[in-house]
Image (cartoon, helix red, strand yellow):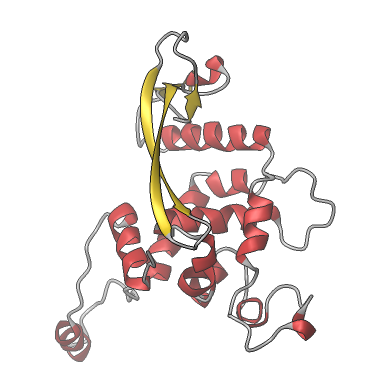
Amino acid sequence: MRQTHDEITQNLAERLCWEVARRDDSRVARRLYRKQEVDGVYRLDEGAVLDEFFHFLDQIGVMALLAEVHGTAIQREMVPYVQYVLLYGLKTLFGIESMNALPALLFSDEALMQLVGFNAQHVRQGVCQRGAAKRQGERTPAPISPETLAKNIVKLNLRDLEMVFNGAIRALAKAGLFGKKVTGIVDATDLETTERDEGCGQATRKRKVTDKHGVPGVISGKFSVRKIATTSPSVARRNYI
């Protein structure tokens, strides 16, 4: 199923918008005509909303944490690793299901790409021109390819990932969004277990497949699972001050 730009914009509004804005051009015109004070001028799009969100993350120190993450086994870095993390974060925030949909739904938006550190030239021409001579047809606007993001995001150093999780929770607690002591699940990953494992249950997962004739279908499978907070029990309960 293909997603549209309107669908991912709605995802963003449902996940991130704490206040609802509405457009009233006539009211704005009256206030300007009467020379009344205007609190601010905002574009009703994703860039304006995320600009405030990124500013909030920067103020509480989360952006500084993200800037410290690194990828393993990356010998030559053409793009700072933090940009891969931010791009994948936007993919998750917008609810974009397919990596291949990123150029059309996200990478071509110059305002959003500038938020994560790319400029207009990167969006229009790409960060790297490798393979440009072999390209057939016009290039899709995007700073990098979805394959590049997919290959590099999985190289995130696990210790850096733990640092970001714990540091973000600590920063949110310090900002007063919840209590200083946080007890909860940071990583709710399903672990496949056997029936002999204590506390295990059973889950059913559906997976889309295509047979040898190209006909799509869905198969279901059951397996025993056990929910855990983290691979390290000491991380599950910690005092974030």
Q: Image height check: is 225 above or below 176?
A: above
| Residue 240 in sight in this render | no
Picture coordinates of residue 77, whole percent (x, y)? 79, 58
**Left or right of residue 87, residue 51 in this image:** left
The residue under the point 53% across, 21% down is 235
Q: Seen in the image, is 106 located left or right of residue 7?
A: right
Residue 70 showing in the rendered view? yes
Instruction: Find residue 164 and report its image quarter.
Output: top right
Q: Residue at x 19, y 88 (%)?
A: 29
Q: Is residue 155 above or below residue 108?
A: above
Q: Position of residue 209 (x, y in %)?
A: 46, 52
> Residue drawn at (79%, 50%), measured in percent from left and top?
74
Q: Is residue 176 left or right of residue 78?
A: left
Residue ranking furthest to the right = 75
Image location (x, y in percent) of residue 25: 19, 85
Residue 98: give x, y in percent of width and height. 48, 60
Is 94 placed above or below 40 here?
above
Q: Which residue does the image show at 39% across and 54% down from the upper left? A: 217
